[in-house]
Image (cartoon, rainbow, N blue to C red):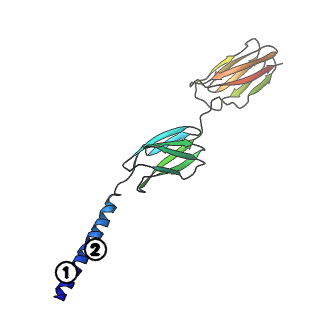
Amino acid sequence: MKATSKFGMMALVCFSLGTVVLTGCDKDKDNDYTLEFNPEEVEVVVDATATATVSGGVAPYTVTSSNSEIATAAVTGSTITVTGTGEGSATITVKDKNNVSGTISVTVEAAPSETLSFDKDEVEIAAGESDTVTVEDGTAPYTVLSEDETVATATVAEGTITIVGVAAGTTTITVTDDDEISGTISVVVE
C-alpha cells in the first residue's frame, strides 16, 4: 500500500506543477498585443506642438524621447503631445502599464520666418540712381510699396527689387509675399 500512496502523491505533485506552468503561460498571453499610434510619424516645427494618440495598450502610458534637444513628449490619457525643441529627428518611445512599448518617429523643422529676408536691409543711393535688393525667402509673387514715393520708388520682378532714388530723404520699402509675410528695406537717398 505504501507504493500506491507514493504513486498517488507523485501524480498529485506532477499535476499541480503542470497547472502552475500552464497558469504561468496564460499570463504571457496578456501582453500579446502591440501599441498603435495615430499618426505613426509626427512632423512639427521648433517651439510648436503636435499630438498623436495611442491605442491597443493598457493605461497609464509613459513617454521618453531619444533626444530631448530635438523633441520632448508628455502624455495625458491616450494623447501624446510632442514639442519641437530643435531641428532634426528623434524617436518617442511609449510604454504602457505592462511595459509593452512602441515608437513614434518625429521630424522637427525650423519655424517659418515671420519676416522676409533680403541680401541687404539698407540701401544708400543718389537721386536718379538705382540699386537692387534680392528677396532670400518667402513665396512669390511679391509686391512692393514705398512709404514715400517722393524719396524713392520700387518695383519687383521675380524676387529682385529695384529701388530708384527720386529726391534726398529717407523712406522704407515694404515687400510682401504671397503668404502675406512682409519685410522692410530702409532707403536713404542723398
Of callouts 2 and 1, which one flags the residue occurring earlier in the amino acid sequence?
1
The amino acid at mark 1 is Gly
Q: Residue at x 31, y 60 (%)?
A: 29
Residue at the far right in the pictured view? 190
The amino acid at mark 2 is Leu
Residue 84 percent coordinates (x, y): 56, 42
Circle 2 Cα neighbour tier, 10 Å, few/some/many (<14 / 14–19 / ≥20): few
Residue at the far bottom in the pictured view? 2
Task: Give the left or right position of residue 39, taking residue 21 as reference.
Answer: right
The residue nearer to you, when weighing 147 against 58, is 58
Q: Which mark is residue 104?
A: none
Q: CA distance from mark 2 to mark 1?
A: 14 Å
Residue 160 percent coordinates (x, y): 66, 26
**Residue under circle 1?**
8
Compared to 17, does 187 lie above or below?
above
Task: Give the left or right position of residue 104, taking residue 150 as reference.
Answer: left
The residue nearer to you, when weighing 25 against 145, is 25
- The quarter of the picture where the C terminus appears is top right
Image quadrant assignment for residue 45: top right
Secondary structure at numbered mark 1:
helix
Secondary structure at numbered mark 2:
helix
- The quarter of the picture where the N terminus appears is bottom left
Residue at the far top in the pictured view? 150
Q: Residue at x 53, y 38 (%)?
A: 49
**Residue under circle 2?**
17
Circle 1 Cα neighbour tier, 10 Å, few/some/many (<14 / 14–19 / ≥20): few
Q: Residue at x 76, y 26 (%)?
A: 122
